[in-house]
Image (cartoon, grey):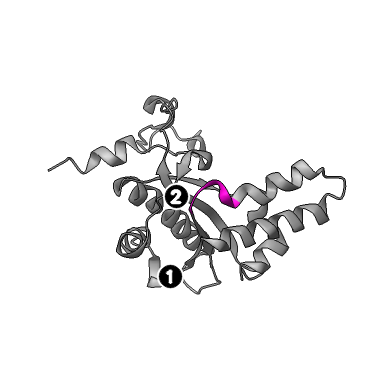
């Protein structure tokens, strides 16, 4: 049995342009989504949801991006508009993770937002464990009011990310990772700034 830590220790984002068919579907996609949504969720609020964009819906999404980009940038060239239209076609499957954080008497919005981020991260881990590649992006359209409205994202909600998923054509070399000594320290409770 393979060591369960290995996929976690070797996870690597794969750029959308390197993702081809096939994408997970049917029972495999259900399994991926089940793992994606198995995250810390204080109060069991489920402060997130996932919208699947695949097949012909990617073309419609591309048309939407081209239209919104063109309206916001009337000086844009035909090549720039075409580039925006092609964005959703970079991978066969896109999962839009929406953060639905709400005011709550006990649970801060920030905790709810972090739960949505955990969905994004779990999605990437599940994709790799199932033999696929993925990339978590936002890009300009995650923050655009017209795009968000078209995806039925309410004004008080946010898009935590678009997760592009497919079969890698190739996997890029791993990037340099942080040196643990630079980002990890032990707190002893002695000599804190508040005490000096």
Is 89 magenta? The answer is yes
Residue 134 inside the magenta-drawn segment:
no
Would residue 39 be visible to someone looking at this image?
A: no
Residue ranking furthest to the right: 75
Picture coordinates of residue 79 (x, y %)?
A: 76, 41
Dot 2 or dot 1, earlier in sequence: 1
> In the displayed image of the protein, which residue is found farthest to the bottom?
105
Q: In this rendering, which labeled residue sits more in front, label 2 or label 1?
A: 2
Is residue 180 at least partly visible in the picture?
A: yes
Q: Between residues 186 and 9, which one lies in front from this camera angle?
A: 9
How far across and down, in percent of the image, does residue 165 sit? 45, 50
Residue found 36% across the figure and 60% down from its top: 29
The magenta segment is: 88-92
> Viewed as shown, does residue 166 lie left or right of 144?
left
The relative height of residue 53 versus residue 191 in the rendered view (above or below) is below
Q: Secondary structure at mark 2?
A: strand
- State the residue position of label 1: 46
Count of residue discs: 2
Residue denoted by label 2: 165
Disc 2 crowd rating (10 Å Cα; few below 14, some 14-19, many 20+) is many
SS type, badge 1? loop
* The N terminus - image quarter: top left
Task: Calculate the distance from the C-alpha at mark 2 to the C-alpha at mark 1.
Answer: 23 Å
The answer to whether residue 169 is above or below residue 66 is: above
Image coordinates of residue 26 in percent, x first then y, are 34, 64
Name the image quarter holding residue 65. Answer: bottom right
């Amino acid at each position: 049995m393979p060591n369960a830590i290995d996929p976690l220790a070797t996870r690597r984002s794969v750029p959308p342009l390197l993702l081809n068919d096939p994408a997970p579907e049917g029972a495999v996609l259900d399994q991926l989504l089940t793992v994606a949504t198995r995250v810390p969720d204080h109060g069991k609020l489920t402060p997130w949801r996932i919208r699947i964009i695949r097949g012909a819906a990617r073309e419609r999404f591309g048309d939407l991006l081209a239209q919104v980009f063109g309206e916001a940038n009337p000086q844009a060239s035909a090549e720039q508009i075409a580039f925006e239209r092609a964005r959703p076609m970079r991978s066969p499957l896109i999962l839009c993770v929406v953060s639905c954080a709400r005011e709550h008497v006990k649970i801060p919005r920030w905790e709810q937002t972090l739960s949505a981020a955990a969905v994004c991260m779990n999605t990437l881990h599940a994709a790799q464990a199932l033999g696929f590649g993925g990339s978590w992006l936002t890009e300009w359209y995650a923050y655009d009011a017209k795009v968000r409205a078209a995806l039925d994202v309410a004004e008080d909600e946010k898009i935590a990310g678009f997760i592009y998923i497919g079969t890698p054509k190739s996997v890029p070399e791993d990037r340099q990772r942080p040196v643990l000594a630079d980002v990890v320290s032990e707190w002893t409770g002695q000599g804190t700034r508040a005490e000096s």
